[in-house]
Image (cartoon, rainbow, N blue to C red):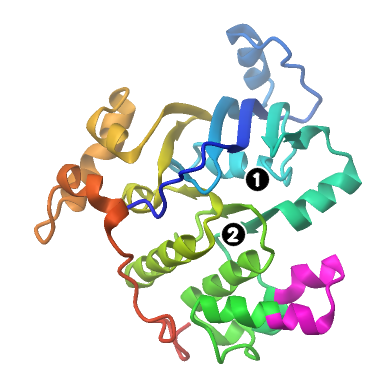
Amino acid sequence: MPINQADNTDTLLEVKGLWKVFANHPVNISSPDNGTLEDLQNNGAVIAVRDVSFKVKRGEVFVIMGLSGSGKSTLIRCIPRLIEPTKGQIIVKGQNVLDMDEKRLIEFRRYETAMVFQHYGLLPHRTVIENVAFGLKLRGVSLQERQDRARHAIARVGLEGWEKHYPSQLSGGMRQRVGIARALVQESDLLLMDEPFSGLDPLIRREMQDTLARLQKEVNKTIIFVTHDLGEAVRLGDHMAVMRKGEFVQQGTPEEILTNPADEYVERFVAGERVILSGSNRQSIYTSMPNRANKQAMSVPVSAPVAVAGRR
């Protein structure tokens, strides 16, 4: 179920006509047509993102879903310009990220957005609390303040008591909790999550989804969440987009995409999941989803994560 229904109609993020072409030479797609794109591909270029546009409201969870190689991770990394877009606009709180110079871009990454990666991105030689506080250290926050904020974030994700441990001493689920705490401590409006739970065991994955649901109720972030798992998208997303070969083939609420797929590709994508989502121990997804905003997240106690010491 989606973890928040945004009441504020203010748009925090708007992406307009975004393209990303990987090539060994500069490319010009000011007026892209089929002939131009075909010539680029014939010369070895890879068109990873094709003319993508979407809007995300404050407090909303927008899920980008697609199979491996569809371009979803490239797209989310274009937002903070970890990958440099070829063309388009990325407007965050009224500012076009593509117009930012190096200094302004560094400030944007440090203060206005935070990212959670699939493979954690933790510093192995730093403890849990040092990893969580690292972004605050780069901002110049005092030692006492960043430790206080880091401890609070660590407690929020259920890792209180693990502050002095190193990443190698934690399980995968615990490492991802550290990654989420590191993002939360930044207190940025925009949270980017690139398949953060895809490498976890099913039980731990479900626990992390519940943790995110609970945290979103508390902090009400604007989240862009990338996944290839339809069940995860339905549980977490207010709106979602299905991506194929660099393009959005459908956007809408989870209900809209499940009940009215735009084409054969989307139909095949969702068909296999309907049975799972409407399993024997719960109602059909079509009858249960409208009431999802009224349900409490089914999370385990945060003080006792399923992934505990000794699990690697």
Coordinates of residue 102 in the picture (x, y in percent): 89, 44
Coordinates of residue 180 in the picture (x, y in percent): 57, 67
135 drawn magenta = yes
| Amino acid on which the number 2 mark rests in the picture | Phe
Q: Is residue 265 visible?
A: yes
| Amino acid on which the number 1 mark rests in the picture | Arg
Coordinates of residue 255 in the picture (x, y in percent): 28, 38
Q: Which residue is mark 1?
A: 77
Q: Is residue 8 above or below residue 85?
A: below
Q: Which residue is mark 2?
A: 117
Secondary structure beneath dot 1 equals: helix
Q: 10 Å neighbourhood of mark 2: few (<14), some, or many (≥20)?
A: some
Residue at horizontal 65%, vertical 45%? 77
Whether label 2 touches label 1, CB < 8 Å: no
Q: Which residues are magenta?
A: 133-148
210 drawn magenta = no
